[in-house]
Image (tube, coloured by chain):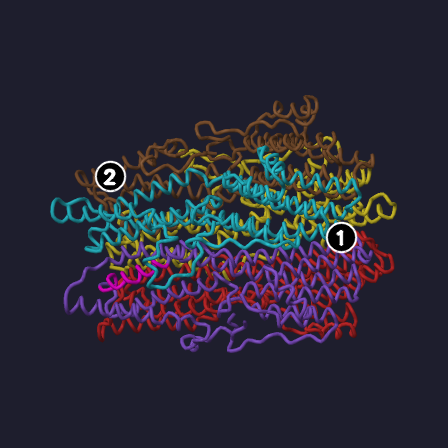
Chain colours: A red, B purple, C cyan, D brown, E yellow
Amino acid sequence: MIVRDHPSALQLYIVMQGSIVPRIIGKIVGIAFLTTAVVVIDTHVVRLPHISIAAMSIFGIALSLFLGFRNNAAYDRWWEARKLWGAMIADVRNLGRHMCIFVGNGADRAHILSWAVAFAHLHRGALRDVDVSAEITGWVGAETASDLLAHQNPADAALRSMADQIGSLTGQQAISGFGQMTISKTLSSLALAQAGCERIKSTPLPFVYSLLIRRTTYLYCWLLPFALIEPTGAFAPLLAAVVAYVFFGLQTVTNELELPFQNVHNGLPLDAMCRTIEISVSEALGQPAPKPLVPKDYVLT
Amino acid sequence: MIVRDHPSALQLYIVMQGSIVPRIIGKIVGIAFLTTAVVVIDTHVVRLPHISIAAMSIFGIALSLFLGFRNNAAYDRWWEARKLWGAMIADVRNLGRHMCIFVGNGADRAHILSWAVAFAHLHRGALRDVDVSAEITGWVGAETASDLLAHQNPADAALRSMADQIGSLTGQQAISGFGQMTISKTLSSLALAQAGCERIKSTPLPFVYSLLIRRTTYLYCWLLPFALIEPTGAFAPLLAAVVAYVFFGLQTVTNELELPFQNVHNGLPLDAMCRTIEISVSEALGQPAPKPLVPKDYVLT
Amino acid sequence: MIVRDHPSALQLYIVMQGSIVPRIIGKIVGIAFLTTAVVVIDTHVVRLPHISIAAMSIFGIALSLFLGFRNNAAYDRWWEARKLWGAMIADVRNLGRHMCIFVGNGADRAHILSWAVAFAHLHRGALRDVDVSAEITGWVGAETASDLLAHQNPADAALRSMADQIGSLTGQQAISGFGQMTISKTLSSLALAQAGCERIKSTPLPFVYSLLIRRTTYLYCWLLPFALIEPTGAFAPLLAAVVAYVFFGLQTVTNELELPFQNVHNGLPLDAMCRTIEISVSEALGQPAPKPLVPKDYVLT
Amino acid sequence: MIVRDHPSALQLYIVMQGSIVPRIIGKIVGIAFLTTAVVVIDTHVVRLPHISIAAMSIFGIALSLFLGFRNNAAYDRWWEARKLWGAMIADVRNLGRHMCIFVGNGADRAHILSWAVAFAHLHRGALRDVDVSAEITGWVGAETASDLLAHQNPADAALRSMADQIGSLTGQQAISGFGQMTISKTLSSLALAQAGCERIKSTPLPFVYSLLIRRTTYLYCWLLPFALIEPTGAFAPLLAAVVAYVFFGLQTVTNELELPFQNVHNGLPLDAMCRTIEISVSEALGQPAPKPLVPKDYVLT
Amino acid sequence: MIVRDHPSALQLYIVMQGSIVPRIIGKIVGIAFLTTAVVVIDTHVVRLPHISIAAMSIFGIALSLFLGFRNNAAYDRWWEARKLWGAMIADVRNLGRHMCIFVGNGADRAHILSWAVAFAHLHRGALRDVDVSAEITGWVGAETASDLLAHQNPADAALRSMADQIGSLTGQQAISGFGQMTISKTLSSLALAQAGCERIKSTPLPFVYSLLIRRTTYLYCWLLPFALIEPTGAFAPLLAAVVAYVFFGLQTVTNELELPFQNVHNGLPLDAMCRTIEISVSEALGQPAPKPLVPKDYVLT
């Protein structure tokens, strides 16, 4: 995630970090060049067929609506993913309070909370396809870490182990029925957030939308020069470049937001949120808390 | 569900798997041909009546808005259906943890979880109108399978049987009131997701929208050639084909998303999600878990 | 509710069942005739004032947006109503399972479930303003039926009676506190769905929207001929008819979806959903279940 | 709230009750007169500067989008407010059932339910800034009424008193822990709905939107005559009046829906909903229920 | 938050408090001046390249849609933030009632409620990056205040302390399991609202949107003069200024709503809402309640 203040009007055009211009500059320049070529050929070589700007405007409105739809859907996925992680942060804190109320502030609580941190890291590992054994070893030990990672769904295995621990507290009469119920609800809430994130990861927007919208965007930008010859004169290449910037830019942003767990500039800062969980757990356990992650080059991973 | 990476710009126009072009190519070519005919006749034979592009643009904006509405509504149905299945996956996992906390890791837990897998398959069978007796026999036995399938609503019957088992645990004092309450809530949650899916299957978008929008799309595409004669010249057939591609394509996608449980390219991968449930249950029971389903020709069923 | 497959392209223009054309054909023909008259008079008799199509397009875009708003709001009401009924179906099934877990499969369960069916019918009766005494007599007896119907809110009275029965089970020590709590939650859930439906029935969209949008639609269609004279030539009457079809059609659909409980073509199939509840309850009680309702002439009531 | 059937096409233009025309007729006539003046001066006196209709159309589309946004936001507030009151009605009914299940049908239940009616009236009083002491005296007595009204937040004080009564039942062992929990949840649900209504009342749409959109609407309508001179001829004043009707009308509606608790034509019928609560409570207590409120001149307050 | 009545038509153009005009007047005047310069140079010095207004209109519609998207997203954040604070107000009141029902009206209740006020202030302090030690000292004492503020997340620490107090009541048998469960749920609800606010504060809209939309707005306004030369004549500078007002104005509002906890004109009135909580708690404790905050110069902080 890019973290920086709104740039001033002067900075606005030179900020490159966090911008999608570097990734689509080829397309923008390509369209501008094509437009220049079309205008030059049309004026000096041979008259090319023109398209009336009104015809393009029908096309443009339809394209705007469909790009807008895809953008909304992708943003909703991104924001829902952030909400699910926010709920997980709250649930881990709740878990700490529930253990305190129903079991007490002893070793069992520290144990369960350490597993909750492991759960968060394992979940992050599954969403980003990265190895998190280093991060969880400090919390649950190397052996348990490799046990957990041997499962197809290690985060789910962590939750199951937490339930086993609650189950064994039950056997020891160390927790009341009220405590079992409250804590199993909190675990269910974590599981629901986990399943929600898996859903977002495993079910992208229907592929056919991407095809339909990307194809149409290319077609639009390729036809645009023939529509701009007449009505914009010398501004034609500039206008074509601006339109290409808007449409390809929006499409590139949308591609990133659609899969919010990827480690890209506009992805969610899963590392930073796992750190937030570690801080909350450390403070809950009265241990020295690590520092929050800070952005590097304005990017929080 | 189509599962593949975003194609590069070069691949974009040759990807056919997952595209809706094959299904609407007839309409696209038809409109292009009609436009060519109209242009040729207008130029060389007899002047046909023209429609100003501005008049068509009013029509086009209205059509875009209504197509956009239908598309949004269909996508919402598709995504809600996916959410409901995701919630069911989480609920089955929760059920395993709740049995562990409140009943223990014995035969009763294995029994209930096997029934939960059967529930998922039976629900899938009802949504897709397919026979699932083979899939559930391994989990609940052949006799029970045919018993369940004899009901009008077999998935509901499976949930009822699970409740009966909890009821008999109650009689044996093997479960506390807290456990009864927690587990009956989880069963209710599964039932709510089931009823939600039945709602989406049994209540399509109001039929009249389909009529209104499809009729209007056809009318629009048939009138378009008369509007494109003047302002687009030699590009007219190409533009008409592109507009037909966008409007008919969106409509075809929408038809598939509207009924998300059908076994079509853009339907939900119910088989793969039932497999996910089988994996979760197998891991919860400490049994060897099956492999996740993989896409064939980029299609996950 | 209309239940039929998407018509093929050929059928599309002859399907009348489920179409709103029959109800607005007068307006469509009227506008087409008016346009013809305006064109003929303008061409052969006296030049009428023209309106530029661009001026109408501003008007048209505003109108599309506002029609789109009303359409969205009405569809949301319709879909929320369907969701509430779907939740009621799930809640009745839950009630059966909860009685089984907390009270057992005896006469008390049959009693409560019969009342739940009566509740559904009484609720349907209030929403549709129809008499349901015949349907509920079979479930709760003639005397109780007339007792219930004597209340201003018979469905609420049915829920209250169910609570009284749970209260008397409490007195007999036949139900635990857990059971009381779980079942009273399920009754509350039914009551919430009921109050939601009453809300939708008693609070239509603000009347002023209907006035504003309907008046504007008429004005738009009456001014349209003067805008179509020039830019569409011989197509003017056809285009005017198509625009009238889209705008009046959408408005008529919206009027029906706005009040989703009415017994009209696009209303919700309350009879069929009450039958679904009867089937679920019959299967839960081990009784022979009635058949689901089937559409007559593609209409499910 | 206006309650009347959709007017027929003939009635449509003469219905004044529930219309916003009377409130904006001055603006409409003003714009029409201005347009007439501009046309006359431009034709017969001195040529005024013209604005091309295309330039106005950019402006018009932006304005439509922003008016549409504000309209959506205001309607959402109105509908959310109605949902909150609907939930309160259900919660009061639930409270009656819960008292019956957990405490019994005696004087305590009657007492709590009377306070629930008082709560609804006090809440309405706070939302509408009206005095409700007359309405609640009949339910809780004059002394209690004036006690409650002495608080800054009388409705919250009523809920607190209800909790005190539950607390004293606890002291008398007249209610189980299950009952305490269920009933305190219902009270919390009432409090949540109350806080939601307070939120809607105390936090209007950001003031700056009103300024931005209203100023822009006026500017648009004042510039419109200069754009209509050319393209609409004799229709100019009529078209200007229609556009003014749509834009000012929508704005006036939005102003009312934004603050849904005010006692205006499009406000929510709080009096009628409090009566619904009184009816439910009376029927629950077996007392003769009052009649529902009926609209006067099609207006339900 | 600006609190004032809708201004009359006459006041509309002179209201400056709550308007964003002062902050964008430079840009508006700049664009108007640029337009004047372009028109003058084009007419009297040298013909500049023109852009057809139709080409700009495609651009304008796309820009409106994207500005509209960003505006919607920002408003949703602002309104969600307000909902979360509204839920917190209700939860603090619920906490008071729950303590009364499950623990009684003694010192423990006063203690917990004082901490709840401290929680609200600490949360506000974290959201606004302000020091709140003065506000909380009166409620929890100076020593506790500085203890709490030593944590990385002081509001979370306050909730943890409240859980500790509930835990110690458990040790003293002063609270039942039902009370533990109900109150720990209320604390969880506060924690969820807290995490929601932290999410909104720490996760702004993706930075790339701001860049994309702001850059495009500037480009649009700079190109506009070349499009307005022809079709608007003497009105060109006025129209350009109006368009700049709409687009820059909307962008400035959006920037404020995007971060709703900042102490700016359109930010949320966190001070006033903390005061509401203090009033509720004071009334619940039977103490004299402070006065609500009143707006200064129409601004509530």
B67 sits left or right of C165 in the view = left
Which is more foreground, mark 1 or mark 2? 2
Residue E138 in picture, x, y percent from top left: 75, 39
Asked which quadrant contains residue A236, the reply is bottom left
Q: CA distance from mark 1 to mark 2?
A: 70 Å
Residue name at image x 56 percent, y 37 percent: D201
Q: Amino acid at mark 1?
A: Ala
Name the secondary structure under disc 2.
helix
Residue D181 in picture, x, y percent from top left: 74, 43
Query: In the rendered structure, does residue D293 fall within the stretch colored magenta?
Result: no
The residue wearing badge 1 is E150
Chain bearing tag 2 is D
Viewer can see residue A33: yes
- Residues indicated by labels 1 and 2 sit on the same polypeptide chain: no
Chain bearing tag 1 is E
The residue carrying pointer 1 sits among few (fewer than 14), some (14 to 19) or many (20 or more) residues within 10 Å by Cα, namely: few
The residue carrying pointer 2 sits among few (fewer than 14), some (14 to 19) or many (20 or more) residues within 10 Å by Cα, namely: many
The residue wearing badge 2 is D38
Q: Is residue D130 above or below residue A9?
A: above
Which one is nearer the viewer's eye here, B8 or D105? Answer: D105
Report the span colored magenta.
B214-229
Residue name at image x 28 percent, y 58 percent: E52
